[in-house]
Image (cartoon, helix red, strand yellow):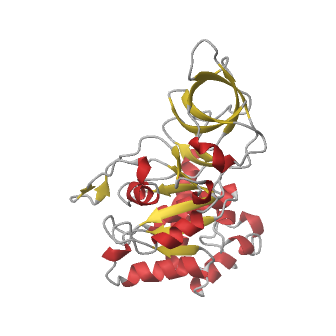
Amino acid sequence: MTGLIVRGSNNIFYVRPLDSAEESDLEILAGKELECRIKGKVLKGVQGYYNPLAPGDKVQIEVDPLHPGKALITELVERKNAFTRFNQKGMAPQLLAANVDMVLCVTTPASPPFRPRFLDRVLVQAERAQIPAVIIVNKWDLHEGDYDVDERLEDYRRIGYRLLLISALTGEGMDDLAALLSRRVSVMVGQSGVGKSSLINKLAPHAELKVGDLCEKYERGSHTTTMSRLIQLQGSADGGCIIDTPGVRRLMPDGIGPDDLALYFREFAPLVGQCTYGLSCSHRIEPGCKIMEAVAAGVIHEDRYESYLRLTDELKELY
């Protein structure tokens, strides 16, 4: 039997069975969950990861006839993609979601403050995984015309990212978000405090996710989501599904070396290899660097370039 991973922790996974191969992936979510463990010591295809499976993964399972509600995971069905981050504590890639159609990068204009460098990291990881990304600006009701926020958001739009300006509190833009999510499996990524749980509670009231308070002193949110979890957004398949991920304060991209990073900043990528020093260019001091010329000409935003330099330095410490 094929099943879909909904959530998991400490090598115990909750799986919703697929009744038939012809049935839509989104339509099985009304079924019961089975508590599953991996059969044997090793599951083929998960080696090297900090965690072996993530919400969105499809697996083959064997139901335990002696223990109702329990089963064994015998095989991982090949993934079409995976959204990961590099877990520096475990020094290994960490799976956040699998088999997704879209990455939702959630941020806020205020409370907590707008942090474009975190957005850049999520967007880089989405580019690496070849998953379309959309920037969701929640708490738009708190925006008071901050020039820096407006300018950075406009630059993201200029380089081709879609933006949704919404508010879980007032309902502004929520219909547009629901329409975007329809019949898709999406993964929601953002720092603590940006309101991911509030958004999901509006889209899926049955989820009843805990909502944390913002720490006024540090303007940071508390961790209310402790593991990734797949949630059906409405009572039918048309609502789509969303994978909620724990809020993180800092995301280290996975599978990207310092020499390859420019390929995943989408406005940098066409210029890679065009510099006077070719692929050897560090894009810092060399004459004839096309990326630095693009920054000087305003084709690449200075803040995006600074984000690239900082992330390059951090990746050099890992590789």
Q: Give residue 249's position: percent from left, percent from top.
A: 41, 53
Residue at left offset 59%, top offset 25%? 36
Give the quarter of the image for residue 59.
top right
Q: Give residue 181's position: percent from left, percent from top.
A: 58, 63
Q: Give residue 153's position: percent from left, percent from top.
A: 49, 78
Furthest toward the left, the residue is 217
Q: How many numbered marks have been drawn onto this rendered protein structure?
A: 0
Residue at left offset 70%, top offset 59%? 130
82 is higher (above) or lower (below) than 174: above
> Is residue 289 in view?
no
Residue at left offset 66%, top offset 65%? 262
Give the quarter of the image for residue 157.
bottom right
> Is residue 150 in view?
yes
Side (left or right) of 215 relative to 74: left
226 is higher (above) or lower (below) than 250: above
Q: Give residue 2's position: percent from left, percent from top.
A: 72, 34
Side (left or right) of 137 relative to 99: left
220 is higher (above) or lower (below) than 268: above
For the N terminus, the quadrant is top right
Residue at left offset 57%, top offset 35%? 50
- 14 or 215, nearer to the observer: 14
- 187 or 200, nearer to the observer: 200
Furthest toward the bottom, the residue is 297
317 is higher (above) or lower (below) than 293: above
Give the quarter of the image for residue 258.
bottom right
- 58 or 171, nearer to the observer: 171
